[in-house]
Image: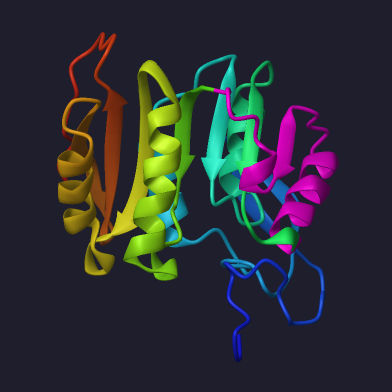
Amino acid sequence: MAGTDHYFSPDPASGFVPREISVRLAGAERRLTTAPGVFSPERIDTGTQVLLSHVPAPPPGGHLLDLGCGWGPIALTLALESPRATVWAVDVNQRALDLVRVNAERLGLSNITACTPDHVPTDLRFLTIWSNPPIRVGKSELHDMLATWLPRLEEGSDAWLVVARNLGSDSLQRWLQGEFPQDLAVTRAATHKGYRVLRARRRTGMTAAIDVVAE
C-alpha cells in the first residue's frame, strides 16, 4: 500500500476491489471476501494461523473479543465455534469492519458485532480475548490499546495474543508483566514459526495452572 494507506487507517485510500479467497476456518473450507486496504487480504496470515492452532476452544457463551479483527478470520472462528456467544470484532478500519459483516452474512452468522472501539459498551466484560494485535501502529499506541482492553477480562479469563519474535514479542511480554503485576499472569503459551502466543489471565479467580508449550 502506498502513502498513508495502512491496514490500521480508519478509511483506506486504496480502491475497494473485493476478491474471494478460500480459507480453512473452524475445521472446514470457507469462501470469504477480502479487499485491499486491510491486513493480509490474500490469505490468513501466519501469525493468525499460529494463534488459531494454539488456543483452546473458546467459551460457549458470553462476550468474546477479537481485538484488531481485520477482515475477520479470528472473529469468524470464535462465532463458528461458539454460536451461543456474542463475538465483538473490533477495529478502527471501516473497510475491515464492512468485510467482517459481509463474511458473517456469507457464513450465516448472526452472533458477530463488528464495530469501532468506541461502540463497545464500556461495562462489557469478556470471557476471552483473541488478538493478532497491530504491532506496527507503534509501541505507545499498542500499549495504550492493551492497557484499555486487557483489564476488561472477566475474572479467571484469558487473553491470547500472537506476536512475531522479531517484532518484539518478548519485550511485550515483559511490559505486560510489569504493567499488570497484580492483575494478570502473563506467560508464553507457545512458540511456532517465529511467533509467540502469549497468554494473559486475570489473576483473581484463577482456576487452573498455566502451561508453557515448547516449539
What colour scheme does the image use? rainbow
Which image quadrant for residue 171? bottom left
Q: Is 77 located above or below residue 163 in the figure?
A: above
Residue at image coords 59%, 37%: 77
Q: Is residue 94 left or right of residue 181?
A: right
User: Which residue of the protein is positioned furthest toward the bottom in this rendering?
Assistant: 3
Q: Is residue 152 visible?
A: yes
Q: Does the magenta stretch include residue 119?
A: yes
Which image quadrant for residue 137? bottom left
Residue at image coords 39%, 45%: 146
Quadrant of the image containing the N terminus: bottom right
Q: How many marks?
A: 0
Q: In this view, does 71 lie to the left or right of 33?
A: left
Q: Is 26 located above or below residue 171 in the figure?
A: above
Q: Is 192 located above or below residue 182 in the figure?
A: below
Q: Is residue 133 left or right of residue 200?
A: right
Q: Is 193 located above or below residue 199 in the figure?
A: below
Residue at image coords 26%, 8%: 207
Residue 163 image position (x, y, % from top left): 32, 56
Residue 182 image position (x, y, % from top left): 18, 26
The residue segment tinted magenta is: 95-124
Q: Is residue 23 magenta?
A: no
- Frontmost residue, 107 versus 112: 112
Residue 75 image position (x, y, % from top left): 61, 40
Residue 145 image position (x, y, % from top left): 44, 50
Q: Is residue 21 visible?
A: no
